[in-house]
Image: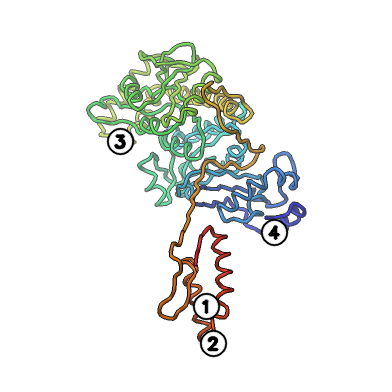
Amino acid sequence: MIPAGDQTRDLQARNRGRLCEPNLKKSTSAIVIESQDINSCSPLSTNHGEMDTSDFYQNDLGLINKVSELTGQGLPELVAMHHKVLRVFSRGISNFKLVDVSPEVSRALAERQPVLALESTIITHGMPYPRNLEMAESVEQIVREQGAVPATIGIIGGRVKVGLERDSMVELAILKTPAVKTSRRDFPYVLSKGLNGGTTVSGTIIVANLVGIKVFATGGIGGVHRGGEVSMDVSADLTELGRNPVTVVSSGVKSILDIGRTLEYLESQGVCVATYGPTKDFPSFYTPCSPHQAPYHVESPKEAAGLIHSLLELGLKSGVLLGVPVPGQFSMAGEEIEAAIDAAVAEAEQKNITGKEVTPYILSRVSALTSGKSLDTNVALMLNNAKVGAQIAVELQRLTSPSSSSSVSPGFQPSSTVRSPPGAPVVIGGSILDCTVRIKEDSIKNQEKGRRTIGSPRKRWMDQAQKDMEDKGADWRQVAEGEVWRDRQECKRRGLETSG
């Protein structure tokens, strides 16, 4: 415990010269992710200027000390972070050893700011360079303009990045090093080999849920391929939506797929499907509507956030698919796009293109067959989805923030409400293990030497001490009573009971 008097001098002195790298500590009940500015470790500061360390200690010292006890990390290391970025997850998982969360995203999550996840397969496999890089940067700018923090997820050198820096984004865009289209099944290979990867919708859902991001915007999700009832070619995007409580904002299912069977599959997975707008007409990626309808629809970011909030409050492990129609001025004629898709699908079959290579090939061919119109539409709908997704993330954060009022059913009365100071570390969950040892025998004696041992926790230590005294010619019985008294005090301190 550090006294509240000289924290600032102590922190600055002890942290000069430390490596300012993102660090990760793991305990049995929590994972602590810390992130520091690479330029400086001290003094303690935030976006609002230098921070009064004494005020920080008065508000958060108790909670910080508890985190320090859990992780075994010193108190100065926990508080002397340039951005004061610290988040505690109640998940005993080792996956975080392979995940790097950027300082911007870490700070946003710790301070409960709205964050929007973005995929990287659209950069590596969805568009040609430099259009893909321009699109990715424009998307992040739009997200920031709506008041949210963008978190583009990708893999660089075998490490999962949450919040790609520009250099990493450029590396994926120009494919300086080949990138693997990465879904759940691909993570072990890509990470173990130290490869680059563009995370698919399913891969991004997994990572977003892992770090606590609940809203994710993309162009369109995968689904059941045409002829999927024979080939069994079904995208992992659908199963991950059924496994993770993440909301995907997209222009529906890519129209190169079987939309009807995809909606049926999502229903089987327990995924809540809704459209964004005045009707339930489910979008068809390049066009605002398809012959199919969604079960529900929402008409505003606030209404969408309410739907998501209810899902999270109920604790359901499945996600939400929100279909956002492409803006009318960028939509394509149904007949034109269908003819291009049919031709591209036929070409893929003739060339025996299968698996995860099908979608990139068909999208590329459709773009060529439509003289680039489909690519323009793809960019436009991605920008629009990012805008809508960011707005929903902002509204959802308002609903889930501690200051927001939530309705509680009359029959349920919470026993207590715990609120942490703004910006304080958040500890969720935990485990307590009480161990009690009771020695029932009146006494435990060493029959060989006549030595008396006081309980199993110190048996080995006491036996050795008695042996040492005997070797030196000392009579251990002269100090036995003193040892017994001290040992009983030690047992009491450890919660043990002794007798005899």
Q: Which residue occupies 50% across, 74% down?
A: 462
Upstream in the sequence, badge 2 or badge 4?
Answer: 4
Q: Are marks 3 and 4 in contact (CB under 8 Å)?
A: no
- In the image, is residue 194 above or below residue 345? below
* Residue for badge 3: 355
Which quadrant is the N terminus positioned in? bottom right
| Residue 220 horizontal/vertical position (percent) | 42, 26
* Residue for badge 1: 465
Could you give the CA–CA distance between mark 3 and mark 1, rounded to whole angstroms? 69 Å
Q: Which residue occupies 48% across, 65% down?
A: 457
Q: Given the current orientation, which residue lies at the most extreme left position? A: 230
* Residue for badge 4: 14
SS for dot 4 = helix
Residue kind at label 3, given as amino acid type: Gly
| Residue 52 horizontal/vertical position (percent) | 76, 45
- For residue 17, side relative to residue 465 (left or right): right
SS for dot 3 = helix
* Residue for badge 2: 472
Please tell me how crowded label 2 is: few (under 14), some (14-19), or many (20+) other residues with Cα within 10 Å: few
Upstream in the sequence, badge 3 or badge 1?
Answer: 3
Q: Foreground: 434 or 167?
A: 434
Residue kind at label 2, given as amino acid type: Lys
Can you tell which of label 3 and label 2 is closer to the viewer?
A: 2
